[in-house]
Structures are given as structure tokens and as C-alpha cells.
Amino acid sequence: MSDGASGGLSRRGLLGLAGAGVAGLGLGVGGDRAVIAVAASATAPSPATDVYPFYQEHQAGILTPAQDRLHFAAFDVSAGTTRAGLIELLQDWTVAAAAMAAGRDIGDFGAVSGPYDAPPEDTGEALDLPASGLTITFGFGPSLFEDADGVDRFGIRARRPDELTELPHFPGDMLEPGRSGGDLCIQACADDPQVAVHAIRNLSRIAFGRAVIRWSQLGFGRTSSTSTSQATPRNLFGFKDGTSNIKAEEPGAADAHVWVGAGGGPAWLAGGSYLVARRIRMTIETWDRSILREQEAVFGRDKGEGAPLSGGTEFTAPDFAITGRGDLPLIGAAAHVRLAHPTRNAGIRMLRRGYNFVDGTDALGRLDAGLFFISFQSTPENFTAVQLNLARHDALNEYIRHVGSALFAVPPGAARGSYVGAALFA
Amino acid sequence: MSDGASGGLSRRGLLGLAGAGVAGLGLGVGGDRAVIAVAASATAPSPATDVYPFYQEHQAGILTPAQDRLHFAAFDVSAGTTRAGLIELLQDWTVAAAAMAAGRDIGDFGAVSGPYDAPPEDTGEALDLPASGLTITFGFGPSLFEDADGVDRFGIRARRPDELTELPHFPGDMLEPGRSGGDLCIQACADDPQVAVHAIRNLSRIAFGRAVIRWSQLGFGRTSSTSTSQATPRNLFGFKDGTSNIKAEEPGAADAHVWVGAGGGPAWLAGGSYLVARRIRMTIETWDRSILREQEAVFGRDKGEGAPLSGGTEFTAPDFAITGRGDLPLIGAAAHVRLAHPTRNAGIRMLRRGYNFVDGTDALGRLDAGLFFISFQSTPENFTAVQLNLARHDALNEYIRHVGSALFAVPPGAARGSYVGAALFA
């Protein structure tokens, strides 16, 4: 997997190595030309110098150990963009994403080496920063295949998987159109927020005239672990949640629950996945006035250790049958851990990869804060089944509000010399 | 300075140490009781385990080596809050801030040790995290001394320094009231955003019924260095700016330019400073379409190294006299580095401590991004003089818009057993 050793090199150092003798302007499918990728163990935590290869069987940013920071953007393809224009955009995005994942700036000339009479190809704010574990993950929304007016803009309607439709309305949903949907999405994760922001900004810039950001979200702290080497972080309710998340080290789990199988959908999506994003606003102030017993009852976990209320430690399996005083179950019927648990959902598991967010303060002085939920699953029906269960019964609903929602099909990883989603247009 | 060794201890570990035998509920002026502070060198970079003492001559978060992340909040005191109520709030804030700066959760019982029939005293999302270099800095706005109706709510109008009035309107200002002003401010800086967010959230919660957040701002990346041990970071224009910032290691610089001297204002403010905050939106998309030559001319610096266009390297003093082709100065008359330079501003210097921000996307799909500028100076007149110069002439104005503004008097550090701002109410 390793084309060269670049662990500690900054973008400029790499530019120096790669730039000599390179001619030509503009972005294209560069393939092997200047991509320097270093294989990184999927099980190691990712320090700032980690580099995850972009060209892989599956897209990076799914099983990759969850990085600390997120910038997520949904795009709408601009009116007038043709099928050829969309393909060209995906090609340009692929080349740029591979360069940034390798810790390089984008384009042939990058940010600072001129020509002086043209805008720099790269915006430059990540020039001195290492790759910082950056992964860039692309997805296709239902509206890419058929827009709101039923128009098949790009000649791909016939290739839309049956499952790729808007998610149903769930009880309690208070979705804002400006935070929902989108023709395309890009998830940029890194251990340095400046690197994630730089990635979305430059990909948005590349899209100029072809696609425009519909909404975007920064996440400052991961709320999930996707590797056994990572500690379970806390959400803004102060709890460890998602302890039983799918981990990269679990043999067979990703094949069973995350990747679309060869027979599980259209061929172009085999080895891909479905990404669900939900902006979940937490009513922090109400939660903070609830008593500790109520908080623990809502999650069904002890707040300190994250152990299920049925006993044990964080990773002890919850016992939903065990009862306490008055023969009431220690983990209540409406407890989040019970309702979300695979054993209560026909064995359904998802790979969760969400982030805490705070977007300042609303007009009443309350923090606009919560969880930007992201999950990957082999079919969106798995998310829908679990979410219906939660939306109807979860005690947590008193303290949260789903305000944004989107679904994307995530194609498999691109082969070197090709581009993300190529099989869809083949 | 060191009361105990706590470098690698989590909040829970510290809670275990400090909590045994502590009785009583509620917040009060705890002074020495459970504050564990470890002196940290002002010149060292701050890894996550750094702990900066809260009780110091000057408040922390000014000369402290600039941490990576920011959460800043401006508060308005609620109607009906008395002078005694305001003092009590400052006392409660002081105790809580000292605990959090030491890496502990707040209150006598904290987040998870009960009582189970009361809301936890600490919200808990930073439980497993180290102090992460957290500093919490408090300030008093002009309206605290006299509100918009001319009312002296807290009996302190007579003690208002003459300089503590709203900043003047600068040419080009497009200020939004919802992002400007405030009776009080809290600047929380840390190397982990979850720690900074936790601090503002818990201080806001303590203020319930007494003060409410007027506006708040997250910053994801520092844009200034306040120590010679730190590299100059890049702003979202991709440039190194503020190279000549005041550094903690410069003998006499802070006394001359940052701290209010004994004879320079009211006695209660001696050893304090003035904090100016400006939310500066960058019109990223316009900038990104400008040519490299224009970008470098605007700043008066080379984009790659940050060297002045008159030659040398990043830390070479700019030569404003030297000319090139056509006898034009290499650093133009409207270049930012020229207009902001102390030699062009009667020797005025400020300690800058700003942060990059991205708050998602606006209705046109443009990043709502820019610089949250923070400066500390011995008198706000210094800021005003420089900003008038910049607002009138700076070539950068074509690409930025000041949309938020606030000024606060920052009292000196609290003595152990006392509280921040005590001298104002003595």
C-alpha cells in the first residue's frame, strides 16, 4: 500500500518532492502521478501524522478509527450541470481528495508556488500541517437519481437502489429543509479541525459552477469509537453511549452490517454502504435540571463508568430481565440502551460515527448544541427500523429534537486512476 | 505555585482525591479547599495534560501560550439581579473556574457521585478528560456599569474607567447587535474543544436566573502565537499574520502594552487589561478567486514563508522604504503589514489571541467563516487608533467584514479565597 514514506512531512515538504518537473495546469484524473500514500494500521489510534490511503477497496472514513474532528457538507448539483459535468466533478474531487489525504495541497502548483497571475490552486491554510489522519468520504443522495420534479438529470435513475429514497417521517421529527437532504455529500474527518475545514473548503471551491453547498456541519468531538484501541467518549449529556458500536477489529461484523454485499443491491454499490446523517439538537438546559437518577434511567447506564444499570462495567452486556425493587426491571422499558440494543432490534447493528457539535447560542441564550449522528449500514432499512423503535418509545426523546436528516449511498473506494462512483456511470 | 502533582490525572481521579470527607451542598467561595493547581511554565507548549493555575496575579488566558481551541461567551445580567446577586455570581464562577482549570469537575459532588435525587452539579461531558490547558478569563463590559437606559444597576458607575465605553463606529463596520456587546464575558481556551465547551456550559448553568448568554463563539484554531515556543499559525486566507505579536518571553512588553498600570486607571483594574473581541467574517469565495500576487500584496507578505515582501524570512522586520520596479514600494501603501505595524501606529502594540471560526454555511452556500479577533491591551484607545487606520486604508477590507464587536475590562487575577473582580466591589 505504501508508495513512499511521508509520515512527518508537511504539505510543503511533499510539494517540494512532488512538484519538480510537473507541468500542466488544472485538475484532472491524475491517478498515480503524485499521490503519496502511507498505509496506516486500521487498529492504531491516529496521531496527527497518520496518513490513511485514499485508494482502497472501501472508502476511508468508515472503518477508519474515528478521528477527533468533523466537517460534513451536503451539496446540490447546480442547474445546467450535465452528466459529463457531474462525472468531471467527481474526477476532480477524487484527485484532490487523494492529494489532501496524503497531506499534500491540491493541484499542480498548490498554494504558494505560483503562477502569480492566477488564483492559487489550494487555499493554503493547511500548508504547514500534516495529514492529521484526514479521510474524505463521498456519498450520493436520492435526489441525484431523480430530482423533486421527477427529472432524471444524469441518466442514472434506472440504477437507483430501491432503498435509496428519502427516509420516512419519524414521530417527533422537526426537520428543517435547510439542514436536510442533498444530491451529494462529503464527510471530512481529521484530528486537526483546520485540516477538515480545509478539505471541505477546497472541494467546495473545485465544485464552483457545478455544485454548491446546501448545508454543512462542524463536529468538534467524536462520540463513537470504531476501534477497540479507542476509549468510548462522552456525548453532551455527559454519558458514554454506543459502547456496543461495531469495531474494525470484529471479524465479519463490517461485512454483515456495514458493506453492501455483492448480491445486496446494484453492482456499482457492492463494497459501499449507506450513510445516514441526523442533526440531533439536545435541549441541554432541560437535561441539566434533571436529577441524576432520571438521567441514568433514561440511558439505562451509570453516568460515571457507563456500565449498564443491570450491573458490571462499561463493556458488560446489559441484562434486560433482571429486576430490582418492586419487581421493576433495573433497565426500564423506555431506557435508551434497551431500545437501541441489537437484541431488541432483530439483531440490527450499525456503525456509528457521530460528533458533538455546538453552533453558538440561540435567541434565548441556549446553546445550539447536540449530536451530529452519522451511521453506516448495509441498508437504510436497518436505520429506519431502529429509529422507528426509538422515536416511539425512547425516554431520551424528552431531551432531544431531530432537526436535520439525510441519506446517501456511499460507493466503494476508487481504484487508482479511476474516480469515486465510476461504476455508477460505467 | 504547586499544591500537588496532578499532571496525568483525570477529573474523576482528582475528584476521588478531593471528594473524600467533603460535606455540604451548593457553591461558595471555597478558596483553598480543593483546588489542585500545578504551575506550568509560561514558555512551554501546552500538551493536553498541562494545568495552568487559576489564582494568579494576572488572569490566565492572556499571556498563557495560546491554546488550540476557544469557546467565548458574552452574558447579560438578568433583570432583577442585585449588586449582592452579581457578587455572588462572580464568587460562584471563581470557585467553579478554579476547579475546572485544575482538571476537576465542579461542586462538592460533581457529576456522578450523587445525590441521586438532585441534578448533578457538573454536566459530566469532560469527566475523563485532563485539564487540557484550560484557562478561563472574565471581563466586564461598559453596560455593567451603566445600562442602555443610564441606570447604575450595581452601584459601580462611579468606578467605571473613562476608556470603558462602547468602541466607536469604524468605517465599513456592519455590526449585528446579536453578536456584539454584553455585560460580562468569559473566554475559555483549551487544547481540547470539549473541555472549553464544558467550561462555558457549566458557567452558564451556574448563572441560571442571574445572567444569560447574549452571544457565544467557538473558535477551532488559534491564529496567534503568544510564546516564542509556538509556530505562527495560518488564518483562513492561508497567511501567517501577527508575526510581531507580543510574546510572553519579551521582557517588559506585557507591562508596557498589555497590563493596566498602577497609575493608568482605577485601582481595581491595576494588573488587569482590556479585551477587544471582533467577529470578522471573511468573504472566502472572493478571496479564493483573487490571484496570488494580489493576495501577497494585500498582506505585504509572501504566502509560503510569511516573509515581508521587502525580503528576508518570517521574522525579518519589514522595510517599508525599499522600492522595486517603477520606484514603487515593495510593501504597498495599503498593505496590511504596513498599516498594522507598530512603527506606523506610534509604537502601539497589542497582544492578539484570535481564533479561526467556521459556523457552517449561509443561505447562498458560502462558508460562514473568518477570524474571531481577540486582543488585550492596556487601554482600548490603542485598539481604536490602529483599527481606525486599518478601517480607512487596509487593502484587506475588500475581503473582510466586521460583524461583531465587544469591549471588556479584564480585572486582575483573583487571590485565593477571594473572587475575580473583588476590588471593584470593595
Image: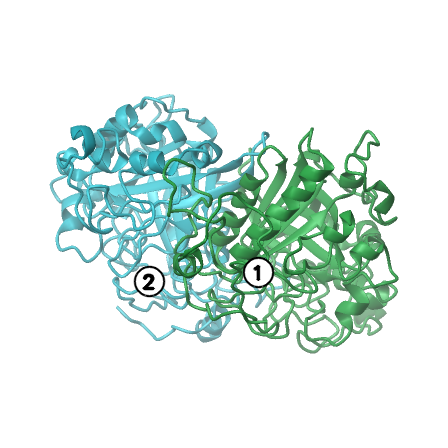
Chain colours: A cyan, B green
**Relative to A266, residue B225 above or below:** below
Discs 1 and 2 share one subunit: no
Dot 2 lies on which element?
loop
In which quadrant of the rendered view does residue A384 lie? top left
Image location (x, y in percent) of residue A395: 31, 29
On screen, residue B344 versus residue B93, left or right, reads right
Task: Return the residue nearer the eye: A423 or B189.
Answer: B189
Q: Amino acid at mark 1?
A: Asp
Mark 2 packing: few (<14 Cα in 10 Å), some, or many (20+)? many
Task: Return the residue nearer the eye: B171 or B335.
Answer: B171
Image location (x, y in percent) of residue A36: 36, 68
Disc 2: which residue:
A52
Residue in the picture at 52% in, 43% down: B26
Q: Tell me, for residue B32, which label it has, or none.
A: 1
Q: Amino acid at mark 2?
A: Tyr
In which quadrant of the rendered view does residue B9 lie? bottom left
**Relative to A279, residue A118 above or below:** below
Task: Return the residue nearer the eye: B79 or B404.
Answer: B79
Image location (x, y in percent) of residue A185: 38, 41
On screen, residue A298 versus residue B404, left or right, reads left
